[in-house]
Amino acid sequence: MDHRLFFPATQRNKIYIGDVLSKIPLKEGFVLEIGSGSGEHGVEFQKRFPEIIWQTSDPELEHRKSIISWIDHEKLNIKMPKPLEIDVTKTPWPISFKLLETLQVIISINMIHIAPWKCTESLFKESGKLLNHGKFLILYGPFKIEEKHISETNELFDKSLKIQNNDWGVRNLEEVDKEAIINGFKQKQLIKMPANNLTLIYKKVS
Ligand SMILES: C[S@@+](CC[C@H](N)C(=O)[O-])C[C@H]1O[C@@H](n2cnc3c(N)ncnc32)[C@H](O)[C@@H]1O
């Protein structure tokens, strides 16, 4: 059965996020994606960066089914592992020793604002334990800077998130940076992306 889901924003942003990733010195090994959603990013980046192994994950069964269908559809079964069931708050995450040994990057795209704040805390805490010195944690999404939205559309989006769930919301950059520091990361780069999003690249420094 074809369980592929299609996320319009994902189709729009995958090229730009891929361009950012292309500038990161990725050695052979694993990239672990948290909250992979439909899997459209996963297959796109696996094709674009054949030197790495793209490990997807998502807590939702419907999303993991979609990821498997996307992997089948793109005939990437030999290269790409099946998605892991990772909920960032349920630690330790179920990852193999093989993945851990060569883990280069943990990336989470458009997740932390559509989840309670404790998910951001847990993402940094667990990533801080898993990533070695010099490796990267990458976040993509909308952010506030000094508590201010960077566009009117982000402000409206934030309101719509809070109507759905009061624990969701566009995160403040400075608070995210604070989590990074607590867990041994330093913000290496902030990249402005189309549609008022940011990519934040954190490097493990301790
Ligand atoms: C807006 S979707 C983004 C999906 C995908 N990254 C993309 O950009 O197309 C947010 C994703 O975060 C996942 N998510 C929500 N809470 C999570 C948690 N506690 N741990 C891991 N992933 C979570 C959801 O299941 C969903 O797939």
Image (spheres, rainbow, N blue to C red):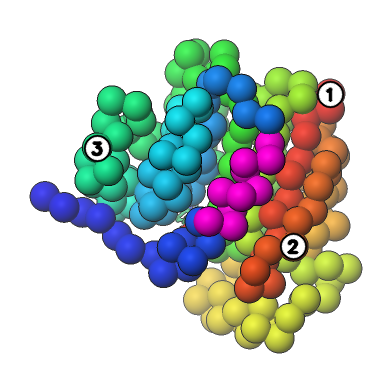
- Amino acid at dot 1: Ser
Dot 3 surroundings within 10 Å: few (below 14), some, or many (20 or more)?
A: few
Q: Earlier in the sequence, mark 2 or mark 1?
A: 2
Foreground: disc 2 or disc 1: 2
> Could one spot residue 158 in this view of the protein?
no
**Is 21 inside the magenta-drawn segment?**
yes
Confirm or reject: label 3 Cβ below 8 Å from ligand 1: no
Q: Report the residue at 45% width, 30% height from top.
A: 50
Relative depth, front residue between 16 and 135: 16
Mark 2 is on which residue type? Lys
Which residue is found at the position 68% from the left and 30% from the top?
Answer: 25
Q: CA distance from mark 1 to mark 3?
A: 39 Å
Where 85 falls versus 168 (above or below)?
above
Name the spot of residue 164 as percent of width and height, x first.
50, 76
Answer whether residue 1 is visible to the viewer in this image. yes
Q: Residue at label 3?
A: 75
Q: How many marks?
A: 3
Magenta part, dominant SS: helix
Q: Which residue is mark 1?
A: 206
Please report the bounds of the magenta region as a residue range: 15-24
Quadrant in the picture for the C terminus: top right
Task: Looking at this view, name the residue that lies furthest to the right.
Answer: 146
Q: Which residue bears the numbered disc 2?
A: 192
